[in-house]
Image: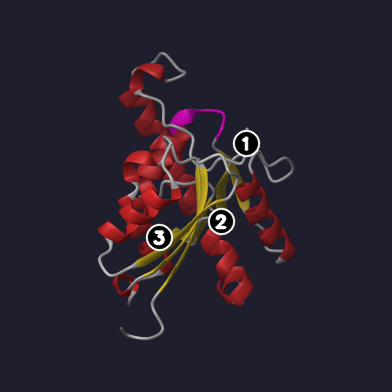
Amino acid sequence: MSDSQFDPIPMAGEAPVAEAPSEGSSEIRDAIKQAIAEHELILFMKGTPEAPACGFSARTVAILQSLEVPFAAVDILPDARIRQELSALSSWPTIPQLFHKGELLGGCDIVTEMYESGELEAALR
Amino acid sequence: MPSTEEIKQRIEAALPGSRAEVVDTTGTADHFQATVVSHAFEGLSRIEQHRLVYGALQADIGGAIHALALKTRVPEHTP
């Protein structure tokens, strides 16, 4: 995977799983909502914190690690519907997406700006 | 492939009175960096500001534009 923030969202016919898209999609959306509710700080990213698959995800992970704050991470790559449902839920087209206490804090650009101004540390501590 | 000029024009058309600077960061016309200055951002959170810009480029996000690093700010002086 390159450092692309925007992978094309597959059409329904290209969905990697054969089951009815609506059923699977709503389960995925519920799982995303639950994960956001259960974790004070959660990052949806490409790859994992140990092996980020995109430069923007890598930079966001590095910022969180430098602040030494614990966070949950979800790799959106294994199933294209995760990305699709997440963006539909958050009205945010890009990855990564960082949520704090149930609210979208931002993507890589906003997290970087907040980090540089000290706002991020203040918000997370 | 959108050009930096096209992206600039689309952002400025969607946000009247705004100024956009767009850079092609890789020279491949798919990774861009944009700085947008607009009064429309006044009173909005950064998230809302970025959503306005994404909205201007919606059709191309996920298509021709692979990445858009974005900075938004409110103008310091009123024109």
Spatial separation of the CA atoms under disc 2 and disc 1: 15 Å
Residue A68 percent across, percent down from the top left: 73, 64
Q: In this view, does A101 lie above or below B6?
A: below
Whichever of labels 2 and 1 marks the residue nearer the N terminus, that label is: 1
* Marks 2 and 1 on same chain: yes
Front residue of this view, candidates A55 and A52: A55
Question: Which residue type carries mark 2?
Answer: Cys
> Pointer 3: what residue?
B50
Question: Which residue type carries mark 3?
Answer: His
Chain ID, mark 1: A
x 36%, y 46%: residue: A89
User: Is residue B21 among what the camera can see?
Assistant: yes
| Image side of residue A27 versus residue B31, left or right | left
Verify whether residue A110 appears in magenta.
no
Give the residues in magenta: A77-81
Spatial separation of the CA atoms under disc 2 and disc 3: 12 Å
Crowding around mark 3 (Cα neighbors within 10 Å: few <14, some 14 to 19, many 20+) is: many
Chain ID, mark 3: B
Tag of residue A2: 1
Residue B26 percent across, percent down from the top left: 60, 45
| Image side of residue A40 versus residue A23, left or right | right
* Marks 2 and 3 on same chain: no
